[in-house]
Structure formats: C-alpha cells, structure tokens
Image: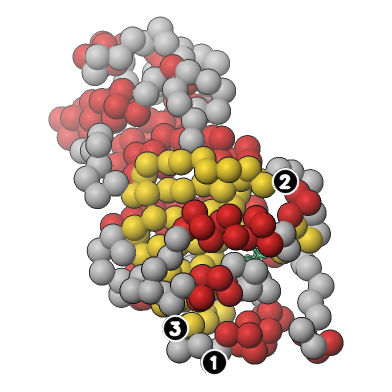
Amino acid sequence: MTEHYQHRARKRFGQNFLHDAGVIHRILRAIYARPTERLLEIGPGQGALTEGLLASGAHLDVVELDLDLIPLLKHKFDSNPNFTLHQGDALKFDFASLNPPPHSLRVVGNLPYNISTPLIFHLLEHASLIRDMHFMLQKEVVERLAATPGGGDWGRLSIMVQYHCQVEHLFNVGSGAFKPAPKVDSAIVRLVPHETLPHPAKDHRQLERVVREAFNQRRKTLRNTLKALLSSDAIEAANVDGSLRPEQLDLAAFVRLADKLCEQTSAE
Ligand code: SAM
C-alpha cells in the first residue's frame, strides 16, 4: 500500500481490521464462495476479506460507510468486473435493489459491533432474498443468537433470529487477530434463513410484542409479565404453563402465545 492510502482506524465506525491471515483463511473457507454466486459484504474496511471473496470468482457488492476508505477500496478492487462498491450506511441500504433471485444472496461481514443487532434485524426484513449470512460478532452476541431455552443467554435476540434462521456458532476469534485489538472476544456465526418457517406465527408483529413484554422482566412468571396482554386462562389455552419464567419457553410456545394474542385482538 502507498503512503497515500494509510488509514487510521476510527472508533466511531467500529473499525477493528482483521490482519491474521490464518483467521481470514478460516472465514473464507467457512463461506466457501463459488463463481456463480452473489455476495454482499458489509463494511469491507481495507479489504481483508474482500480480496479472498473476489478471488472465488463470485460477484461481490460491498457497502462501506467511511468515505476515507473509498479511494483505497477503488484502488484495490475497481479493476475487477465482479466488484461493485456502494458508499453508504448498511442500515439504510435497500438490499432488494440488488435484485437477487430468491434465497440467493450470501451476506458476509466483520461487523462494526455497535450496529450488529439492528443490522441483522434490517437484513431479516429481506430474509427471502438471502441464502446465508456469515458474520464476525462479539462472542457474547453469537452465544445469545445460538442459545437454547433454559439458560441466561436465551432471550429476544435468540427467539426473533431463530424464528427466521437456523443459527450455527462456527468458531471463536481472539482479539489479537485485529488491529487495533478490541476489548472483547469475537466469534463467527452462520445464519441460514429458513425457506419454510418451522413455526410460522399468524402475525409476526404479535410475536415481537409477546417476546418483548415477556423478557422485560425475565425473573417474573409469564402470568405476571404478560398480564397486560393475555389472561391466565388465555395463557393456559395456548398450552403454556403460566408459572414458568420466559427463559424456560421455546420458540413454538412463544408462537402459540402470539397466535392467542392475535385471536384475541381480532375478536375485539
Ligand atoms: N471487513 C474489514 C476487516 O475485516 O478488516 C473491516 C471490519 S471493521 C470491524 C467494520 C467496517 O464497517 C469498517 O470498515 C467500518 O468503516 C464499516 N462500517 C461501520 N459502520 C458502517 C455502516 N453503518 N454501514 C457500512 N459500513 C460500516
């Protein structure tokens, strides 16, 4: 790289650049991109993953917010006809504008940690376009995404993401793999949107409502936390034990509660 392109990592853009070749290689192997595929990378930074993704021969769109990184990305990759650069905020990016066939888009990113959760929710609005997503996230967030009922990690994030996707915690990455090194450990997660939802809710907004309300006070029983939405009888009628705490309920049970709420709302 020439002097001209030296870049100082910016905290406000969550910039921790990958520099460990072994880790980069392991991520690329997990993604295993093929020439005919459509890839989308969020936050390419200085191109640590971009280079290997393009080497697969796949078509790659990238979305980068930091204006200062644009010349560097152009310099490195613009000569490749498979590369398309979008400068802007991934949280506002219209993924449908890429026009991918259903279930085809493969999304990749070593995400800025401050936007990772809202970005995943934004992407899930377009879940039907996406084949899979591979993200580097804070390890703790990956543990919540991949959690199972009964433990402290099981909550709103696990349920709403598992409603749409199969989740796989692939491997952990120590902070030494980045420059500058973040204060937390990281992990790679694979999210694969279901082509057919295993537990479809009648109205997915009611599912969000029930889950949010239930986990507002996760130490209380469902009968208590859901009082404003569902009576004890309605909870029993959904085949859910109201004396349980929210973290003891699986996704299917939350969907039954949401459907009960739906019936109740339409009867009003
Ligand atoms: N992919 C590079 C790597 O692995 O070395 C950079 C990873 S760095 C953790 C996150 C990248 O996301 C930075 O390049 C940052 O500028 C970019 N970024 C931050 N917020 C963004 C946003 N809202 N939309 C798109 N890119 C963003």
Report the amino acid beneath label 3.
Asn
Please tell me whether residue 35 is drawn above or below residue 174 in the rendered image: below
Asked whether the beta carbons under mark 1 and mark 2 sit within 8 Å of each other, the answer is no
Asked whether the beta carbons under mark 3 and mark 1 sit within 8 Å of each other, the answer is no
Between residue 43 and residue 21, name the one nearer to us.
Answer: 21
- Res. 202 image quadrant: top left
Tell me which image quadrant ligand 1 sits in: bottom right
- Check disc 2 and report its element: helix, strand or loop: loop
Decide if residue 122 is in sight here.
Answer: no
Between residue 137 and residue 51, name the one nearer to us.
Answer: 51
Crowding near the residue tagged with mark 2, few <14, some 14–19, many ≥20 C-alpha atoms within 10 Å: some
- Check disc 3 and report its element: helix, strand or loop: loop
Label 1 lies in ligand 1 vicinity (Cβ under 8 Å)? no
Residue reaching furthest to the left:
267
Q: CA distance from mark 2 to mark 3?
A: 32 Å
Quadrant of the image for the C terminus? top left
Residue reaching furthest to the bottom:
79
**Mark number displayed over residue 82:** 3
How many numbered markers are drawn?
A: 3
Q: Is residue 31 left or right of residue 11?
A: left
Residue reaching furthest to the right:
3
**Mark number displayed over residue 182:** none
Tell me the residue at 40%/63% (across/down).
106
Tell me the residue at 44%/17% (across/down).
248
Q: Is residue 49 left or right of residue 192?
A: right
Report the amino acid beneath label 2.
Gly
Report the amino acid beneath label 1.
Ser
Between residue 178 and residue 264, name the one nearer to us.
Answer: 178
**Mark number displayed over residue 79:** 1
Q: Is residue 55 left or right of residue 172?
A: left
Q: Picture coordinates of residue 11 (x, y %)? A: 77, 62
